[in-house]
Image (cartoon, rainbow, N blue to C red):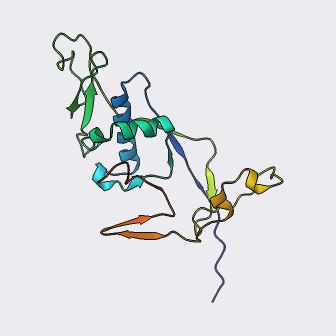
Amino acid sequence: MRPAKPRKPREVKRYRLEVDSTLPPISQAVSIWLAILAFAHVTNSTELARIPDELELSDEQRSLLVEHRPVLGLVGGPRPVISISCCPQCGRWSLSATGAGSTGCRLTLGCTGKPRRAVAAKKQLMEKPLSLVVNNVGSQTDPPVNPPSDPSDTAPADLLEPDHDSPVFVDFGDEYVNEGVGEDISEDFPL
């Protein structure tokens, strides 16, 4: 039997989401959520177990998702994608399944604003991808260019002393959650 060849490290591309900051907060949250659903290749919240590892959300984006969590379960779906149209002037919103918005606000009597439909946020590739070994979750293989004198100064504790060598599966009834990969969002988004 031949010895197995060592696996080459692979680069994991990391992305961040760029959201239009001129949108009302609820539209920003829906925009982020639609981008997460599209990136994970799912159509609704019930199919999403966790936010993909490759997406890096800011604290502000996470707080928007938590704050507007009841609305996020309403958006998504196959074509046409259900989103919201939000009036920037009065702040009211409605569900929208079409791409074209109305010419004027019909949500508040006398409002002169023009509702805008929330679309998926744009993803942007981050500059430095991570190099990971395929067969050992969470271990870095590329040494730093200028290694520090004490590795504990720069590396997180879980990279220095991993709790386990492979992913751990926890039984939650019909669902299996892989604790070695990803970020568990079940507390923030109950299914």
Question: Is 4 rendered above or below residue 30?
Answer: below
Q: Residue at x 65, y 75 (%)?
A: 5
Q: How far from the left and from the top, in percent, is residue 29?
A: 37, 35
Q: Is residue 15 above or below residue 167?
A: above
Quadrant placement of the N terminus: bottom right
User: Looking at the picture, how far across and down is residue 6, in whole percent?
Assistant: 66, 72
In the displayed structure, would residue 177 be above or below residue 107?
Answer: below
Foreground of the two, 76 or 69: 69
The residue depicted at 28 percent of the width and 21 percent of the height is 91
Front residue of 148 and 152: 152
Q: Quadrant of residue 122?
A: top left
Q: Position of residue 18 (x, y in %)?
A: 47, 33
Q: Residue at x 36, y 51 (%)?
A: 41
- Image quarter in which the C terminus is found: bottom left
Q: How many marks?
A: 0
Q: Residue at x 50, y 38 (%)?
A: 59
Q: Position of residue 89 (x, y in %)?
A: 30, 15
Residue sitting at the far bottom: 1
In the displayed structure image, the side of residue 132 where residue 84 appears, left or right: left
Viewed as shown, does residue 190 lie left or right of 107? right
